[in-house]
Amino acid sequence: MTDAAAAIPQDNAPETMAWESKQRRFITIYLPLSCFILILLFPFYWMTITAFKPNAELMDFKNHNPFWITSPTLDHINHLLFNTGYPSWFLTTMGVAIGSTFLSIFASTLAAYAIQRLRFRGSPYVGLAIYLAYLVPPSILFIPLATMVVQLGLFDSPLALILVYPTFLVPFCTWLLIGYFKSIPYELEECALIDGATRLQILRRITLPLAVPGLISAGIFSFTLSWNEFIYALAFIQSSERKTVPVAILTELVTGDVYQWGALMAGSLLGSLPVAIFYSFFVDYYVSSLTGAVKE
Amino acid sequence: MQQAGAPARWVPEKREQTWLAWLFDWKPFLIVICLMPAVGLLLVFLTYPLGLGIYLAFTDATIGRSGVWVGLENFIWLAGDPIFWGAVFFSVFYTGVATVLKFALGLWLALLLNNHIPFKSFIRAIILVPWIVPTVLSAIAFWWIYDPQFSIISYVFVDVLGWRDTNIDFVATAWPARWSLIAANVWRGIPFVAISLLAGLQTIPPSLYEAAMLDGATSWQRFRYITVPMIMPILAIVMTFSIIFTFTDFQLVYAITRGGPVNSTHLLATLAFQRGIPAGQLGEGAAIAVSMIPFLVFATLFSYFALARRKWQQGESND
């Protein structure tokens, strides 16, 4: 938002000569920046390239340049789509991610509205408690949750994941939406109150339509986080066809001592692709929600 | 608040004054109804399991058998277990080194991005990709990059540059495996740190820098006395999150080494998983998980005070 006009001249004083500042800018900004981008993106390049390489090229660096493919193949992708349970993993993950996203958005919209707009005594403390819930990591909860899931008869069922994922989604979304509701002028609601609207009408007709960007941010974030979740899915799901994509690729594709790197990388690529595509459509929402949640 | 005296031009739909409508407009009831889904979910699936986990740590529960109270037996047993102490050591080491590297490199990247550069928003978007992609899947990519025989890094060093004669050993022995995991964690953590800190940097008013430049401050002085104090609050919060989630990390280690070679790269979370779920010793696993709590409490208090300080600085009311 503060792009050109407010850019801060970090390294070159205004009076330095043009050629010198250009050189300096290259060494102090562009060179390190390209190194960062190269290193941050290289694993994905390597993943993609491996996924399309035939096995002969994969294991032979002497005759083939490993950084390029001489005869690209779709074998690994084919194998993944038609010989493994990838389609069912994909559907399970999609269902779990969508289900838990809707559940979390529903719960956190109401909670954020209550905390931010229906001010009551102690509402800041409820907000703080929900924030603290975000700081409880899944690693210390999965063992007791596994026993609970077994007792509820939900073991090996994706429903368990839909119910458990909101534990880390709700705190995040609530916090994001509180910040969003804060930015909507309260006067609008007061006007509606004077005109005789009920609280629920206000929420449905005025606050929610204005908070749509916030809801989208919270939704895509929840979707991504549920898609990427690993430890609960690993602990609660046992049968192969009900696993989520990240778990299944690690546990189902690694067979024996000789790793099928081509298939593994194809799996990783196809598993990352949905979130990557999703991300490319909503980049600005991601950036704003990431920074918004931190700033709140 | 009721529509008793409302003028006729509003009221698009008919609304009877049933007791239900009245109930839904009664604030205390509405507050309870609105908070119920979120608070209910969190109480049932977060607070209760937290308590249950602490209880389980004092029992000898196994899978399929709810155990009996054994007092501190699990902890006493763990205190004499070198693998547990190895995991404690590696968790602290992993968190410490990875956090320092992540924040040093992340701050550098944020400062680079804060300059006026072409395609800024595009660069910012692709930098976040490692953070968006499922960790396990990028960990599998790292696993392949760290392959003992066909590692691309070894290829570059041995065949292209000719600096080494043998392939680099990444995950076959203890110390190289530890450093490899830290490198993967730093790789994954940099984008989050950089983008959050960039947001902090962009809130600094440029007039502060202008004033400092007029006063003749060098670029290091501007960084030290303007940038650092201004991003300190956001830095503290991001760091708390980063520390908590690095300390309790599970996926990277589970995907790349599974705690091997010979248990040298177990974090507390992977050890708890290994003892608790596949081996079925729920009590012992819970005890390992519970031993992470003191550390997390410390980090949370740190976060709370950083937040409070920030509000005080901005002069906002505490709402």
Image: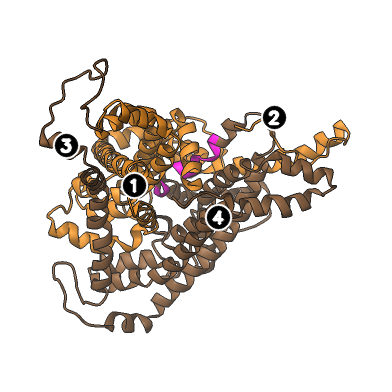
Chain colours: A orange, B brown
Q: Which residue is mark 1?
A: A169
Q: Quadrant of the N terminus of chain A?
A: top right
The spot of residue A173 in percent (x, y) is 37, 43
Q: Which of the two labelled residues, at mark 1 and mark 2, occupies the earlier sequence position? A: 2
- Neighbour tally class for label 1: few under 14, some 14-19, many 20 plus, Cα within 10 Å: many
The quarter holding residue A99 reads top left
Q: Chain of mark 1?
A: A
Q: Which residue is mark 4?
A: B312
Q: Are marks 4 and 2 in contact (CB under 8 Å)?
A: no
Nearer-the-camera pick, B83 or A22: A22
Compared to residue A101, the image places residue B224 above or below, namely below
* Residue at disc 4, secondary structure: helix
Compared to residue B12, the image places residue A219 above or below, namely below
Q: Tell me the amino acid under the disc marked 4.
A: Trp
Q: Chain of mark 2?
A: A
Q: CA distance from mark 4 to mark 2?
A: 30 Å
Residue ranking furthest to the front:
B5
Is residue A93 in sight in this rendering?
Answer: yes
Q: Tell me the amino acid under the disc marked 2.
A: Ala
The spot of residue B42 in percent (x, y) is 27, 54
* Residue at disc 2, secondary structure: loop
Residue appearing at x 64%, y 51% in the figure: B230
